[in-house]
Amino acid sequence: VKELWRPANYPPGPRWLPIVGNTPLIRRMASQHGGLLANVFDKLSESYQSSVIGLKLGRERVVVGLGYAEVKDILCNEAFQGRPDNFFIRLRTLGTRLGITCTDGSFWNEQRSFVTRHLRQVGYGRQAMHEQIQTELTELLDVLDTRAEQPLWPGSILALSVINVLWTIVTGSRVAREDDRLQRLLELLQERSKVFDMAGGTLNQLPWLRFIAPEWSGYNLVCRFNKQLTKFFYPTIEEHKGDFTEDRAVDDLIYAYIKEIRDREGTSNNGSNFTEVQLTMIILDIFIAGGQTTSATLDLALMMMIVHPEVQDKVHREIDSQLEPNAIPHYDDRLKMPYVEAFLLEVQRYFSIAPVNGPRRAVVDCTLGGYRVPKDTTVLMGLRNVHMDPEHWGDPEVFRPERFLDEQRQIVNTERLLPFGQGKRRCLGETLARSCLFTFFVGVMKRFCLVGTDEASEDGTSMAPSLTLKPGITLSAKPYHVVFQPRRNQKGRLQEEIKERINYVQ
Ligand code: HEM
């Protein structure tokens, strides 16, 4: 009977059943609403007329904040800075609770600070990082040149460029596109997001299923997958250990971490948190959090070029008027390209690829929007609700980059745009992601005109762009086809036009 009690002043929400809680209801609602948890929360918020919803999923209490005030509170209030410690989180990190994304308290604080400090030391957020992204862009353009004039889906091509940027930050050197390690890593990560989607909900809420149905519940798949990923990074870490010298500690994140492990071995500090397993988990966190998110956003930005040709035209005009014909775009160029900046912000608002952010854990008994949130409750926040609030945005369903520009063409109105979260747990890769988005997008648009095509794929599926995204841990565009037309071929007109504009600017 105790299982059925709702804590006093717990946020409103559906009644729950013993053991399974609201899980069957939420699953049923999700399948009725495009598989999206964000849609289920919208419905519940409407039914209970509340921007805070209280649930129980399996045995876990889950509170969801959907209004701007609540989301802000969850993002920034100390009480909500924990991460849940549940079966699934441990399964994700090989039965332990390691890495950055899934840890909290002093362990998280120590490890996150170390990684942030050392990423900066190896060039993160500085000139070196932006230049490395430029190098990657040059390679990307070479690949696109060979595939020009034919329908293709840019998603996987872009993803390799993003993975290589992350690879360089972590391991100190880039790998050639032909090196099949990149492709394998990308496949592993894509596979992983499918596996976790399948298993995530059910296994976490009903962990005992792993004993009864280890294959069906996805448990075996997740275990196999974890082993493969760990095995993947093992040789790189071993290589670094083999040729480690003290002065290499500033070369890349792995050397820096090895130095810290060794320094601590030499002291009386037994039980140090700096271990090789923890290093592997940090690397995993960086690839998992950074790869899919950044390339999915880029993919959507390119898709919007064919959905809104008039926006493409404005983007081209701004690029042509601000960049020399042979220039390779640099992150700093964004300051003179407010329209492109506003466009990228609008892509992030309009699609909210992380529609439900979190999960967080209440580290003490506290309140949210006046309701009680008991200690250790899992707390989620509806970022999409903030990005789609009609009271703030007026016409949130309309794709309109101009909402972020004032009359002087300055960027404005960004305080309720939270694609990277906020507060102490805000995205650790924000600058890297922003630099990739801007540099890759502008580089590609400078060189190509993007044209839609009616052609279906071989099995007859439509390859037209769709504004309905593919559900997943983070959302992404359904594969679509686009033709990259080199701009200089456009009736021989564009180069002339560009020259004229440059003369005009000069
Ligand atoms: C467009 C791309 C990206 C988006 C939309 C995004 C979004 C987010 C969001 C919303 C969070 C906050 C989670 C919370 O509040 O609990 C987060 C955390 C995180 N992000 Fe990103 N991210 C992106 C790219 C990256 C990249 C490139 C990296 C790696 C360099 C990265 C690494 C991380 C890590 C490690 C965390 C966990 C931080 C913590 O728990 O302390 N992200 N990201």
Image (cartoon, rainbow, N blue to C red):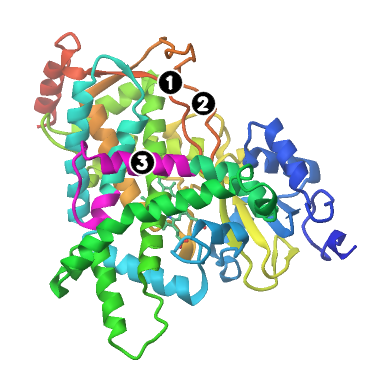
Q: Residues under labels 3 and 2: Cα distance?
A: 24 Å
- Give the residue number, with chain letter if any, for mark 1: 307
Three-letter code, disc 1: Val
Q: Secondary structure at mark 3?
A: helix
| Quarter of the image where the C terminus is located | top left
Looking at the image, how many numbered discs can be counted on the residues?
3
**For this rendering, which residue is in front, 300 or 76?**
300
> 167 above or below 142?
below
> 147 above or below 218?
above
Q: Secondary structure at mark 1?
A: helix
Q: Residue at x 39, y 58 (%)?
A: 428
Range drawn in magenta: 166-192
Q: Is residue 163 magenta?
A: no
- Confirm if mark 1 falls within 8 A of ligand 1: no
Give the crowd class for mark 3: few <14, some 14-19, many >=20 residues within 10 Å.
Answer: some
Q: Residues under labels 1 and 3: Cα distance?
A: 27 Å
Please state which of the two labelled residues, at mark 3 or mark 2, is closer to the viewer. Answer: 3
Three-letter code, disc 2: Leu
Q: Earlier in the sequence, mark 3 or mark 2?
A: 3
Disc number placed over residue 186 in the picture, else none: 3
Please state which of the two labelled residues, at mark 1 or mark 3, is closer to the viewer. Answer: 3
Q: Earlier in the sequence, mark 1 or mark 3?
A: 3
Return the x and y of residue 196 as percentages of the image width and height.
54, 46
- Give the residue number, with chain letter if any, for mark 2: 467
Three-letter code, disc 3: Leu
